[in-house]
Amino acid sequence: MDIGVLKHLRSGLKTIVKDTSDYIRIFNDICKIPKESFDLEQELYLTPLLLLEIRNFAEKMDFDIVLGIAAVGLDVRFGQAEFGPEARAAIISLYRLYPEYYAQAENKNLFLSRVLKEGLHEIGHILGGDHCINNCIMKFSQTVTDIDMKPIAFCEGCREKILKSS
C-alpha cells in the first residue's frame, strides 16, 4: 500500500476531527486478510470477516477506533463500519475509488479526496453517526459520483450527534 495515501488520510482526518489529532497513527500491513473471507462466486472479499480482524486488532492494541484500508474489492461498494456503543472497527476499500476503475484518466487528487471522504464517513459511523440526507459527509454514497458530490465535513446535526456520543 502506498504510504502517501495513508499519510494524506491521516492529515485530512487531523484537520477535520481536531480533538483526536494526537492519536491518529499509521500502521501499514498489520491485519492479514483471512483466506476464508474471499467469496469465489462474487470474486470479492466479505466485509464482516475483515471487520472482525480489524476489531480483534483494535482490542489487542487497546485502540478505541481502527480504520482498515484495503486495496482489494469488498462485497460492499466503498466501506463499512461497526455500529453501536461498542463499535471500534471500520474498513474502506481503495478498489473502487480510483478513477481508472471507471475507465477515467488517472487523477491522484480526486482519488485522495475520495479516500478521505470514505474514511471520514466510516469513522463517523463508529462515532455514532447515521446516514444523513443533508449535504454532509454522512450522506449515503450509492455511486462514486455521490462521493465526489458530498463535502468533506459533517453537517451541524451530525457534528452535534457525534460530539454527544464521543
Image: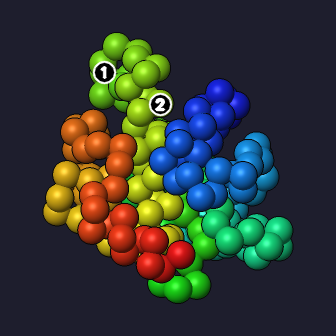
In the displayed structure image, the side of residue 109 where residue 62 appears, left or right: right
What residue lies at 59% left-to-right and 68% top-to-bottom?
A: 89
Q: Which residue is mark 2?
A: 112
Q: Give the residue type that dot 2 points to.
A: Leu
Residue drawn at 55 percent across, 63 percent down: 90
Q: Position of residue 67 (x, y in %)?
A: 60, 57
From the viewer's perspective, tell me whether residue 26 is left or right of residue 11. Answer: right
Give the number of the disc on residue 159. Answer: none
Q: CA distance from mark 1 to mark 2?
A: 17 Å
Residue at position x 59%, y 58% in the image: 19
Does the image show residue 85? yes
Residue 124, placed above or below residue 163: above
Q: Earlier in the sequence, mark 1 or mark 2?
A: 1
Q: Say left or right for 1 vs 162.
A: right
85 or 147: nearer the eye?
A: 85
Where is residue 163, by image quadrant?
Answer: bottom left
From the top left corner, tell me how far across and down residue 76 is, in percent: 39, 58
* Amino acid type, label 1: Ala
Quarter residue 37 falls in: bottom right
